[in-house]
Image: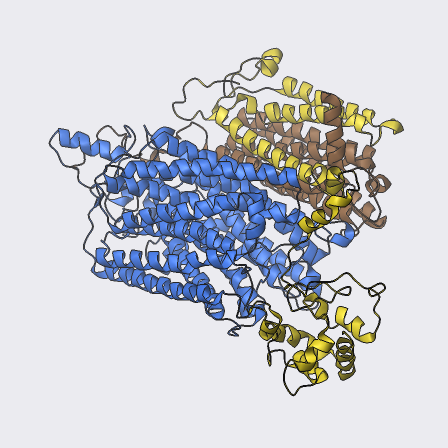
Amino acid sequence: MSTNPGHEGALPHDEHGGHEDAGMKRFFFGHVPEGVHGGLKQYGWLAIFLGIITLVEFLIIVPEGLQGSSVVIAPLVILSVIKFFCVVAFFMHLKFEHPLLWQIFVAGLILGLVVALSLVVLFGVLRPTPRAFSENRQEPFVHHAAEEEHHFEALVIPTPCPVGACPQPAAPGAAVASSPGQALFVGAAACSSCHTISGVAQGVLGPPLDGIGSASANRIPGYSAEEYILESILEPDAYAAGTADGLSQDYDGNLMLSTMAGVLPSLSDEDIEALVEYLLSLQ
Amino acid sequence: MAHVDTTHAPPAHEPSAHPPEHEEETTTGINHRKLLMWVFLGSDCLFFGSLIATYMVYRGQSVVGPYPKDIIDVPITTISTFVLLMSSFAMVMGVAAARNGNQKRLVQWLIATIILGAIFIGFQVYEFNLFRIEGLRYETNLFSSTFFTLTGFHGAHVTLGLFWLLCLTIIAMRNPAGRPSGLDVDIAGLYWHFVDIVWIVIFTLLYLIGGFDAGPEVEHAAVQGWQWITATIM
Amino acid sequence: MVTITGVIPRPSTYTGLWSWLTTVDHKRIGALYGFSAFIFFLIGGIEAGIMRLQLATSDASLVSPDWFNAMFTMHGTTMVFMAIMPFGATFFNFLIPLMIGARDVAFPRLNAFSYWTFLFGALLMHAGFLIGQVPDAGWFSYANLTSAPYSLSKGLDFWALSLQVLGIASLAAGFNFIVTIINMRAPGMSLMRMPVFVWMTLVTSILLVLAFPIITVALIELTADRQFGANFFNTSAGGDPILWQHLFWLFGHPEVYILILPAMGVVSEIIPTFSRKPLFGYPVVVFSGIVIAIMSWAVWSHHMFTVGLGPIANSVFTITTMLIAVPTGVKIFNWIGTMWQGSIDLRTPMLMAIGFVALFIVGGLSGVSHAVSPSDFQQQDTYYIIAHIHYVLFGGAIFGIFAGIYYWYPKITGKMYHEMLGKVHFWLMFVGMNLTFFPMHYAGLNGMPRRIYTYAEGFGWEGMNLLATIGYFIIVISLLVFIHNFFRSLKKGEPAGHDPWDAPTLEWSISSPPPVYNFAEIPVVKGQDAYWITKREAAARGETVEGEAHVDSSTIHLPSPSYWPLVTAFGVAWLAGGFLIDVGWDYIRFPVCFIGGIITVIGVIGWSNEPAAEEHHESGEHH
């Protein structure tokens, strides 16, 4: 890269057309002081050179076998990089300019290149699929009967369920919606997003409803199980069952109240009846 | 004036002594406008870098056709690429003429540049229109969105450059003496060459390499590149 | 084309409204920036207040969820793009030519264009309020929340196009200051003699011109998706919303440093002045600023740890993010080292600067805690992040900005602010800021997600949120004190003199407020802390240094006022606004855009046909 001897004041380039012809070899490869530029001869040869490169690029992909093949990527990229730098260095006469301009442009160029490359790498190369991730890390299955139970315990994600109310293994066949009420429970009424019923739904927040049909019979004195469940659906804040089930106090009816406000309008009376009927059936 | 620090300072410039074309003295010796143009070009690298990155990230990801291999016409674009390169050559000759103060040559080379640039835009309009007729509209698929945005913004840059050169030509024809200055033409030339080098990149990536892509079964561009790099190194 | 400039006479007045509209004086443009930025700072503050009131108690219903979305979106957007960035531009504009010993910036009219474009862009963004179409997808507007099917209002179109206009303003300003700093330094001011604030401005401007093109592309893609049915973020066509996140944060993380580096520069000026010591390790401060700028390009994905980039990408960005804390930490040690054994004068600017250092440390540490990607999985999208960003941007940038306002108030206005009120402002703001944002760390770690419009009671968040709301009102009171102080001192403040702080930089060598030509004679710089050197040399000779005497401004060649920047900026804003017209018949907006384009072209042609400065005698006529 050329150094610039002495920068006292600006050299008005437009007044220095005198030393036009820098000589072919010196122009392209030698050290040329600032303010010197080429003429028809230099630029003309360069234009022919660039035209030939373009032609070569085209010829490379003429054979059908090479079209879209990854073999041609390298030569094509190299050729266009040559073209690129010829235009920048000579047509944009960056070779003959203050090094600061060169630094500014190359900084932008490199950053643009790095940004583009890193995006392509992030999307194309490092793109993780969960399957690939787990397949890479899977261990061959060895049946260790003795360790199995221990193993499971370690893997269970702790959910906020009290002792005794934890999900039990599902009854065979329970996964298929056995009644319209159950269909509503896991479907339109969205109960299952919070409440757990073993073998049917794994909720995340609310009290589990296993055995609610029998448990609710004597939760509030004077309420039948049916009345209790109905009230709990329609007015969740009337009685907070959370503490009674040994749950944290955070799970109170208010959360369900705000949640149900979005769901209740879409449920018909028949829907609610079916839901109550289903919950009553959980003994 | 009682201050002591400015005794050695150069006196304030007498303004009216400056001719209108006088370029101010600067710290680095580089003209303000020229520096501005280079900073702008550095910044524009990021603009086109992001657009090209978008294209490369989405390369081969379209789920419906037409795909590049159905529609890209490499020979015709090779010709338009050559035309744009030649316009760069005409431009640099124009800059040389302006620096030598040869106003007549300047006008001739500028007009040549404009004609070649207009031919390039003509090719692009033809290509876009052909794509539209063949069923590749802006909203058709991922390929069309990325392709039209990238080449469209490049075309917009070229069009802007054409207007700029046109203004310079008109000025040069009306004021045979002194205007536009060599610097004016030089800066317009820098912009024009930049547009050209962006097209060099686009031509290689979108046409020569990407012009034969088919649909989603194509291996991802990055994977391809990665394989190439690892194959070369090892 | 020459006739276009001839039709309307060139403005040449220096008083009245017209003079402000056509000014190209960097000091006036700085004042305009500052005034506008403060208005938008207040607007963003009101939006924050609405959120704080809504969240003060559980199950509150002050605003609807939709309006809450609009509030947090506009709060973030306004504060980042229309308050802190233009506050930075305020200081750049006012101070850079003064600090490097220049008469103006390199392109005075481009500077005016930056301001007007900024103003029109900001107004365009807020015009959405008038027709109830407010952006509501968060300040980083993740795709595909922003895709047309999921965001039916025009709010995001306002957002995207106004940001585009604001981006043009920022880019123009960035170009201008890079050229100014590289090319217009006074004789003798080598790069390593520049004040740190000038360095940080240079670094910020470079970041600006490199980062904004990326958001421009992202916004183009978003607009194309929404307006023209493109598929960039349309998953059903194979598009990927994650690309938006990458592009946004590729811009967004350098942007964070664009916001904080000017404040760091301000603080690096204030701490030496009030410690009576040169900045400790000046080259290291400069170098770490540059390193921060470079590394800010290598950390963007730490905003995206939880999107599933995979273990390699997450590890890489964890490491780079932790590394970027190093140059930042270096700067903090340099500031502390400067204060160490200095004779510290705890005036308001110094208090604000120390507040900056203290609060920025807190924000920096919480930042490192979510640089660790496993830890970030717990913190992502919680109030912990809110706490972090506000410690960095309020405790950092805003404290730095107020430090600068107090520090340069005497220079800008020529009057001294009221010291007691300034200290009251500082302490109230310091307490209020901590009260508002510190509890958010706890709320966040207790699981409170960001962007929720309300929460049920029983999660244990009520107390924290109430404290935060109380803190908010303390900040409001502190700002009222500031506003009172500002206007009271403008009228009744004592004359400040040219150098009230015995400061080291060149702007204090000229009278306050600076005359329109800045320096009657361009100074010669003999070393770092140039004005200290001058004063020391004078003292050695037994002289005292006085402010530069005024000279007749008509003897100094200055750029003339011009209305073309205003016209061009108006055309650009019209062009963007035209896109937003939605009257059912789609083809009306393109003619409207076309008119905007015509206005822009006329502006540019008029601009380029008008010399930067009229012949000398014309500018002197009106006195």
Residue B29 shows in this picture: yes
From the top left corner, tell me how far across and down residue C409 is, in percent. Answer: 28, 51
Q: Nearer the viewer, residue C222 or C572?
A: C222
Chain that is coloured yellow in the picture: A
Q: Which residue is more in the foreground, B104 or C10?
A: C10
Could you tell me how many numbered marks the image carries? 0
- Is C578 displayed left or right of C265 in the figure? right
- Residue name at image x 76 percent, y 28 percent: A73
Which of the colour schemes (rainbow, by chain, secondary structure, one colour) is used?
Answer: by chain
Instruction: Write down the quadrant of residue A225 in the picture.
Output: bottom right
Q: Residue at 64% of width from left, 72% of height from top?
A: A259
Residue C155 % position (x, y): 60, 63
In the picture, one chain is blue; tell me its letter: C
Query: Could you tell me which residue is drawn at 50 percent across and 40 percent down?
Result: C207
Mark yes or no: residue C199 visible: no
* The quarter of the displayed image where residue A110 is located: top right
The picture places residue A3, in percent across and down from the top left corner, at: 48, 18
Which is more toward the observer, B172 or C572? Answer: C572
Q: Of residues C208 and C321, which is closer to you in this image?
A: C321
Q: Residue furthest front?
A: A146
Left or right: A275 in relation to A245: right
Q: Residue furthest bottom?
A: A222
Chain identifier, brown in the render:
B
**Residue C107, position in %: x, y?**
43, 41
Give the residue furthest to the right.
Answer: A64
Q: Is residue B233 left or right of residue C458?
A: right
Q: Classify C569 as above or below C189.
A: below
Residue C112 vertical position relative to residue A87 in the rendered view, above or below: below
